[in-house]
Image (cartoon, rainbow, N blue to C red):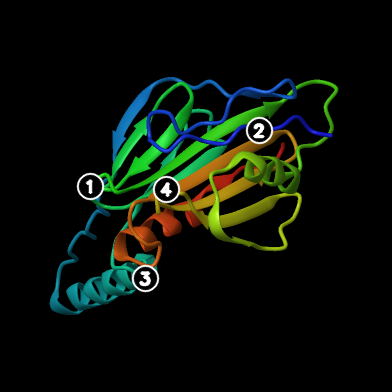
Amino acid sequence: MPTKVNSSKKTAKTGRAAKTSSLKKTSSTKTKAKAAAPRARSKSAGASASSRAASSSKAASSRNKSSNGFHPGTYTVPRGHVSIAVPTFWNLRQTNDDVQVESEASETTVIVTAYQRNAGVKALDARDYLQHFLETAPVAGSLQTGSGSKQLASARFRDEEGDNWFVRFISNGATLLLATCHSNLPLTSRDGRTGVAVLDSIKLKARG
C-alpha cells in the first residue's frame, strides 16, 4: 500500500501535505511573479487592416476569456513540468514547497505541492492518495467524489467550520501533485468559481 499523505492545513502558508517514505517534495527556487494582462495586438496601417486586427483581437479575447470574466495569465514553474493559470488581480507566490494562487481579498486560495516518487516505489496512483487524504480530512456533511483514474482524482467537501474545499491529485506516475482550492465562500460564488477554474487549469507534463 502507498504511504499515507497527511491532510493539508487551512491556510496558504501551512496548506501542504507532510513528506512520506514513498514521496519526496520537489524543491524549486523561490520565485515571486505577478499575472500580466494579455498584450493588445499592434495596430495595422490602413482602415481595412485595422478592422481585421480589431476583429482578430476580439475573437482571441473571446476564446481566452473564462466563464466568470477573468483573463488569466499562465505561470510555469522553473523546472517546466507544472503550469497554472493566474487570474487578473490574484496573487502568485512560489516557495521551496509549493505554488500558491490567492484571490485579491484572500478569501480563496489554490495551493499546489509536488511530490516525487522514490526509487523502488510503484507508479503513483492519484486515486490511492486521494483516499488516504480523505481519511484524515476534516470532512463535515456530504462528500462529492468522481470515479477518478490513476492520473486524476478529485473530491469536494465542506469542513467543520463551513469552509469549502476542492482537492485534486494529479499524477504522471513519477510525480504527484496535490492541488487544493480552499474558500471561505461557496464554490458557486464568483470567487469560488475562479478558484475552481485555476484548479482545472493545472497541467503536469507527462514523463519524458
Q: Secondary structure at mark 3?
A: loop
Disc 3 residue crowd, few under 14, some 14–19, many 20+, Cα 10 Å: few
Q: Which mark is residue 133?
A: none
Say which residue label 3 marks: 67
Looking at marks 1 and 2 on the same chain, the residue that comes earlier in the sequence is marked by 2
Looking at marks 4 and 1 on the same chain, the residue that comes earlier in the sequence is marked by 1
- In the image, what residue type sits under mark 3? Ser
**Disc nearest the viewer among 1 and 3:** 1
Looking at marks 3 and 2 on the same chain, the residue that comes earlier in the sequence is marked by 2
Q: Which mark is residue 182?
A: 4
- In the image, what residue type sits under mark 2? Val
CA gap between label 3 and label 2 equals 33 Å
Residue contact between numbered discs 1 and 3, judged by CB atoms under 8 Å: no
Disc 2 residue crowd, few under 14, some 14–19, many 20+, Cα 10 Å: many
Q: Is residue 150 above or below residue 48?
A: above
Looking at the picture, tell me which residue is in the foreground, 107 or 90: 107
Say which residue label 2 marks: 5
Task: Identify the residue at horizontal 37%, vertical 62% (top origin).
Answer: 186
Residue 201 in percent (x, y) is at 48, 54
Looking at marks 1 and 3 on the same chain, the residue that comes earlier in the sequence is marked by 3
**Disc nearest the viewer among 1 and 2:** 2
Say which residue label 1 marks: 104
Residue 160 in percent (x, y) is at 46, 49
